[in-house]
Image (tube, grey):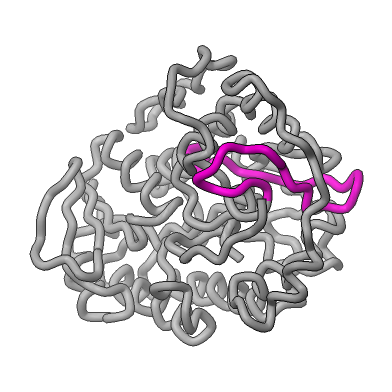
Amino acid sequence: MQTSNTALVLGATGGIGGEVARQLRDAGWKVRGLKRGQQATTTRDGITWIAGDAMNRDDVIAAAQGCSVIMHAVNPPGYRRWAELVLPMLDNTIAAATEQGATIVLPGTVYNFGPDAFPELREDSPQHPQTRKGAIRVELEQRLRSATARGARAIVVRGGDFFGPRPGNSWFSQGLVKPGRPVSVVNLPGRSGTGHQWCYLPDVARTMVELLARRHSLEPFAVFHMKGHWDADGTQMAEAIRRVVLRRSGHAPKLRAFPWWMLTLASPFVATFREMRELRYLWQEPVHMGNDKLTSVLGEEPHTPLDEAVEAALEGIGCLAAGARREPAVSAPSTPAGSSTPARSASCRPSPTRERGYGPSNP
């Protein structure tokens, strides 16, 4: 079993991968990022960037030499040929982790599950997905589980829809508001009164870093659910956006129903819209995850207050001018005893933008 404090992050330019890379660095890890188009190895912002492609097994194995952790947060470029390439990419990560005896970290999703498991999802709930994407994600986890018999280890962290200051594609930045513009309207994708679960990317990354500090005490294939932010009636996230925008700009955006009809019309021509439309079922009934297993290990789940998280997210996607924020409502949780990671500091119409990361937020 590899015990170094060196980690390779695949997808370090994306949402969750970038957050994990920065938090690992800040926790004292030596962090490497694999980047296509990189001409030579270079160090920038405390991260060593290595030329290579996650779709090339030799590149991944070479970059992972001496690593005890591989963060798998990568998609094929431009999200093209996802169904063809995502499993071979994971196989490359598994090959490298098996050789090094490393722990793989995978951002999980609720796509694995079908209505027979709703509304309360446990880590061991039956996985009977109804979508093509869900079936592939089930296979991703099955391959990770099988890899633990060959010397690798794996941690899967499942959460709700991701949002944050550097989100890649997400329902928050594609469905609720329009990135790069002041917020005048907030869309409501869900059925009236239907709850929805969200996860703030820095909290997800912090959770992964804290679990990695305890990785040797976890089972070889360890799965955890995050509670994140539960929007009980489908309007609380939108109301948080309204509060933040009102405070920062002096006006409150309007609320309106998400234009699902437009996705239906445009789906034959825009792949991203087809993917978003396929996931509409997650907005039509509540799907909720508890965090009992996670808190039994960490003591508490890293959690940023909703308005603080929304404000950072809106700034990050260019909907608010960067400026002084109010003091955080709740201080960051302290580091549990025995952990080597420091406490976290407090920190529209849909558009077919390019995928960069990997996680529940991605269509």
- In this rendering, position of residue 76 left or right of residue 120: left
Residue 240 vertical position relative to residue 349 in the rendered view, above or below: above
Q: Position of residue 284 (x, y in %)?
A: 86, 58
- In this rendering, position of residue 298 left or right of residue 233: left
Residue 251 vertical position relative to residue 236 in the rendered view, above or below: above
> Residue 115 or 196: which is nearer the viewer?
196
Q: Residue at x 27, y 53 (%)?
A: 7
Q: Residue at x 74, y 39 (%)?
A: 230
Does the image show residue 182? Answer: yes
Q: Is residue 349 magenta?
A: no
Q: Residue at x 10, y 60 (%)?
A: 41
The quadrant the N terminus occupies is bottom left
The residue lying furthest to the right in this view is 193
Residue 157 vertical position relative to residue 126 in the rendered view, above or below: above
Q: Which residues are magenta?
A: 176-203
> Residue 120 or 132: which is nearer the viewer?
132
> Residue 312 or 207: which is nearer the viewer?
312
> Residue 344 or 285: which is nearer the viewer?
285
- In this rendering, position of residue 232 left or right of residue 169: right
Total number of numbered discs in the rendering: 0
Does the image show residue 292? Answer: no
The quadrant the C terminus occupies is bottom right
Q: Residue at x 47, y 73 (%)?
A: 79
Q: Position of residue 216 (x, y in %)?
A: 39, 49
Q: Position of residue 354 (x, y in %)?
A: 47, 66
Q: Is residue 200 magenta?
A: yes
Q: Position of residue 112 (x, y in %)?
A: 68, 68
